[in-house]
Image (cartoon, rainbow, N blue to C red):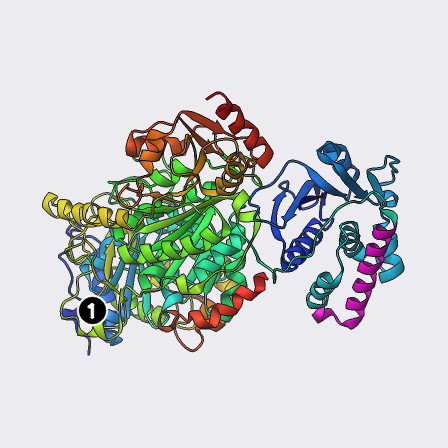
Amino acid sequence: MATLTDYKGQVPAWCPGCGDFGILNALKATLVEMNIEPHEVVLVSGIGQAAKLPHYAKGNTFNGLHGRALPPATGIKLVNHNLHVIVTTGDGDCYGEGGNHLMHAIRRNVNIKVFVHDNQIYGLTKGQASPTTLEGTLSKTQPFGVHANPFNPIAVAIALDCSFVARAYTAEPELLKSVMKEAINHKGFALVDILQPCVTFNKVNTYKWYQERCYHIDKAYNPYDRVEAFKLSLEPFTEKIALGVIYKHDKPAFEDYISIIKDTPLVKQPFQLEKMEKELLNFY
Amino acid sequence: MDYTILIGGEAGQGLQTIGGALSKLLSRAGYHVFSHQDYMSRVRGGHNLYQIRFADREITSPRSKADILVALDLKTIELHKGELTESGIIVYDADFIKKTFDSPEYLHVPFDKIAVESGGSKIMSNTAAVGAVLGMIGMELTVFEDIVRKAFRKKGQEVIDKNLATARAGHDFATRECRRCSFVVPKTANSGYMLINGADAIGLGALMSGCKFYCGYPMTPSTGILNYMGSKAIEYGVMVEQTEDEICAINMALGASFAGVRAMTGSAGGGFALMVEGLSLAGMVELPIVIAVMQRPGPATGLPTRTEQGDLLFTLYAGHGEFPRAVFAPGTPEQAFYLTNKAFDIAEKYQIPSFIIADQYLVDTEWTFVGFDTKKLLYNDYRLSGDALGKTGEYKRYAYSENGVSPLAVPGLSKHLVVVDSDEHDEEGHMIEDGETRNRMVEKRLFQKFPLIRNEISPPEYVGPPNPEIVVAGWGSTYGVIKEAVGILKDKYKIGMLHFSELYPFPGTEKFDFMSLLFEAKLTICVENNATGQFETLVKASTGYGFGVSIRKYDGRQFILDELIGELDGYANRL
């Protein structure tokens, strides 16, 4: 049985009160509750405050480059699909630098879980706007203010027919855990956008700000209805924010189409040169 | 006997079919074949060439003259009639190109008409052309007939019969009408050669080295490797994925490598430029990866379908930060096969990125060989897995060790955790900031490993007399043309070739004192398919040595045998 102690990692270097703590705790608790052991998990991350999470927990870890968490996560899953591959990333890492990979990872539908710590700001580089920063925000690097439309990850994911799309909030641990659990149990690519206040650099989107706008999706809501899900994703973010599983589409994962790994993960397949000898004959 | 057949026409007219069939049947009939292609960056139209040189002795380069010019369009005649040898013949279909030439060197063969009359469709006009060429050189159809039977096996006996009849009709027509054809192609006792191009040789080498994961984004001239791996994926259990871009490609391949299989990616210089950040990641996390850099003329998009050796220094220096790498530059498809194998072995043994650098010319040229010997291939599983992994007490991904190489455990196969980090890290793989750990890690992954990697590098190949007065040096794809040129000039001068196919770490002189050859020669010439002499820069930086003369070519085309002989002769004459 996995315990919380098994998942104890290094002491986090996040600011006191940072929304990342709630996500770290929820992830550890989720894995323990699901009785998944650290060696069965690969935590994949890029760069940013969120991307440090793997060091603050325990598991096999691939802490790669900024924006580039999804490609190695895909490679890992295709080589050993017995592993739980979980990506911990941020709004800059996943929606900015890694935007192109997100789009195509959703299209591939590899069975990996992407937990985005979305604080609507750049923390590690100290306060620049991120793709989800609200319009009009001033920063040192946006002297004229942010006038690009905030990126709507939920709407984009639904538009791409992402097989699992959810939104959670760090200060609501029970909901966060249940969404994480459902994402991990889901077969296919799962995107969970997790709102988390940056107490140091984001003075607008505070705990209070989120508290006033977040609401739980009604139990009667049908996440399989793509049009309804899309409607929900277009609700004005500055007024109301739906939490819960917003869209689901049960379909085969990318791995299901890869005949060569149907029986045995690639990593466990032996290399047999003798079977390849006949390839030489094709060149005569 | 040494003939060249030049086939010219628009893209989409079937040059590949005609050229491919002729190359294959000639090599199967026991002749040495050297073929290369020259094509424009378009799917239809334009002007493309397929050149096949064949002989009864080893040949390793293209010549400037053609003995038979197969003109599928008028443009081919206009552009290339001057390249005809004295006894050469231009074969063309006057009905198709709507023009008739009366000079004796022209031979009209109605490819389309023959195809319709014997095969019932114009589709078979390429078969008629192959038949005609064989008639012109006085070769029997037997070998070609076998190829036709095999190629159309799935399409049924009727299609086979029609093609055979068309080939026969083309052959008979040319035999009857080409009174000026004086080609002598003596029968050979050889049982037939292997015919392979650079791209397939790299792909085959990867497959036979245990590569289980290949991903990439299509880009000429690297696409052939991706295609080859794709064609073998299902049969041999290789995961092949076309990625959204080259940034994804290298990062995905590194993920696969982390998860425990041999992984490879490849691109041209432009795509490799996108991979550079990921290359640096490979250096930091110490994961094995093989990267194929298939050069084409730059900068930027450059000449997409042509050739250049312009990315050597880029490949040597790419990546921010300091980390070891190995760079192999095969000179022939055969070398490409074995060096790809060596690249995989070195990459995993030392947990580093290793490169195969070649170019459009090598990728697309087909050569004949007696055969490849799979017994010469290395396969050592350097991973920590199975029982050994289970028995390991404590596991640290970056444990300090005597030679700087830490155990490479496969994640998920035991309770041990494998942690890699692009940040500077401690032995466990967790990020650190302190200078002391930083120093030890730099020592481990760079200083400890580098001399060991250098020891693995083979010295250059020297072909020539013991004490040459003239040494002609080169690297990579210029092997064949330099070797053949020097071979021809050896009757006139004391001249030898020094060819480098293992470039970095730059070979030492312990195994072979090649530097003495250079120092003692009266004239040293470095031949490169680029503008700035990038290999000369590498030699200078590594040894301090400067070549006497540089021969460089940067028009996007490879060196041609006759031209190189002329240039070398010019310098040698002045001695």
Q: Nearer the viewer, residue B356 or A1?
A: B356
Q: Does residue B173 belong to the magenta stretch?
A: yes
Residue visible at 17% across and 65% down in the picture: B395
Q: Amino acid at mark 1?
A: His
Relative vertical location of residue B69 with respect to residue B352 in this rendering, above or below: above
Q: Position of residue A271 (x, y in %)?
A: 39, 70
Q: Nearer the viewer, residue B90 or B326?
A: B90
Res. A70 visible in picture: no
* Segment colored magenta: B153-176
Res. A263 visible in picture: yes
**Residue B86 shown left or right of residue B460 in the figure:** right
Which residue is labeled 1 in the image?
Answer: B416
Q: Does residue B1 belong to the magenta stretch?
A: no
Q: Position of residue B347 (x, y in %)?
A: 32, 55
Q: Quadrant of residue B320?
A: top left
Q: Nearer the viewer, residue B445 or B545?
A: B545
Q: Position of residue A219 (x, y in %)?
A: 39, 72
Q: Chain of mark 1?
A: B
Secondary structure, magenta segment, majority class: helix
Q: Position of residue B378 (x, y in %)?
A: 36, 62
